[in-house]
Image (cartoon, rainbow, N blue to C red):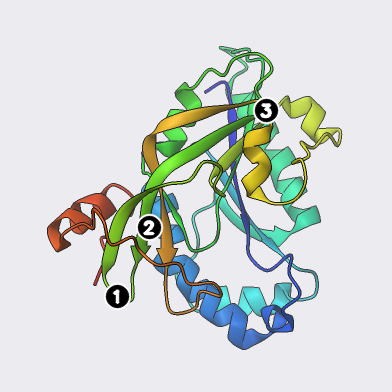
Amino acid sequence: MGKTIVIEINFNNYGMNPNRLTREWISERIRVFRRFTLKSLEAQTNQQFLAVVKLAGGCSGIVEEELAQYPPLPGNIRFGTTAESNLHIASWVQEVRKAQELHPVRHYRDLFIARLDSDDLYHRTFVQQLHDYTPLPGTDALVNQRGYLWDSVQGQMAPVFYSSPQFYVFLYSADAYLAGERIAIPGKGHHNVALLPHEVFKARNFVNVVHSSNVSVKKVPSENRLSREEMKHVLAEFMSEVEYN
């Protein structure tokens, strides 16, 4: 304990595609979320984290109806608008602090907010890594540069390296975050996170997933592609149930 770990997932709360508010789009993306990302969250060896799945306004009713068609989500995985997600985070901070009352632990940064897309995976030890990690003073972000690209349609996977991918973690004082502080990325997009004071994880901590509903389809590099058995071994490190083609 000692840190509050949050995984922030943007579901349909930004973008210009009007389909993201339709039942058809939402139903398909929930299916994708459950097939991939949910299995990664459920596989975490340390469940002391909160995952907030952020929604656009005006579609909560559809989302609730679609989620009701599946088994209930774990209590630490919550769908909601940005405002509702902020309330969930504030409540989670208080839960963590209450659990620490007998053995308080002080950290320079005590709120770690990790970003994850609603179809990608983190290594099953990632939350534990965050609990164990002590950043240097002045560090604003932790960046995962090494991972895998997995085409779940073609059944292809290869290791990849990105200098500043979408798999990053922002570090806050919980009190400052709850008071409204937010880290601003220079320019636009995750490609500029590495311009912030940051540290890099050495482990291969992410799987970027290509599936039939991707808007932008990436190509798995032809070099160093994994065999079917190697893919199975890798995915066992990221998901509660291995699923591959």
Q: Quadrant of residue 118?
A: bottom right
Which label number is shown at residue 149?
Answer: 2
Is 189 on the left or on the right of 206, as rendered? right
Sequence-first disc among 3 and 2:
3
**SS under mark 2:** strand
> Residue 61: x and y, percent?
71, 77
Q: Quadrant of residue 81?
A: bottom right
Which label number is shown at residue 154?
Answer: 1
Task: Give the Cα distance between marks 1 and 3.
Answer: 37 Å
Sequence-first disc among 1 and 3:
3
Q: Amino acid at mark 2?
A: Leu
Is 75 on the left or on the right of 153, as rendered? right
Q: Which residue ends up furthest to the right in the rendered image?
A: 179
Q: Which residue is mark 3?
A: 140
Looking at the image, which is closer to me, 10 or 207? Answer: 207
Task: Give the Cα distance between marks 3 and 2.
Answer: 26 Å
Q: Quadrant of residue 71?
A: bottom left
Q: Amino acid at mark 1?
A: Gln
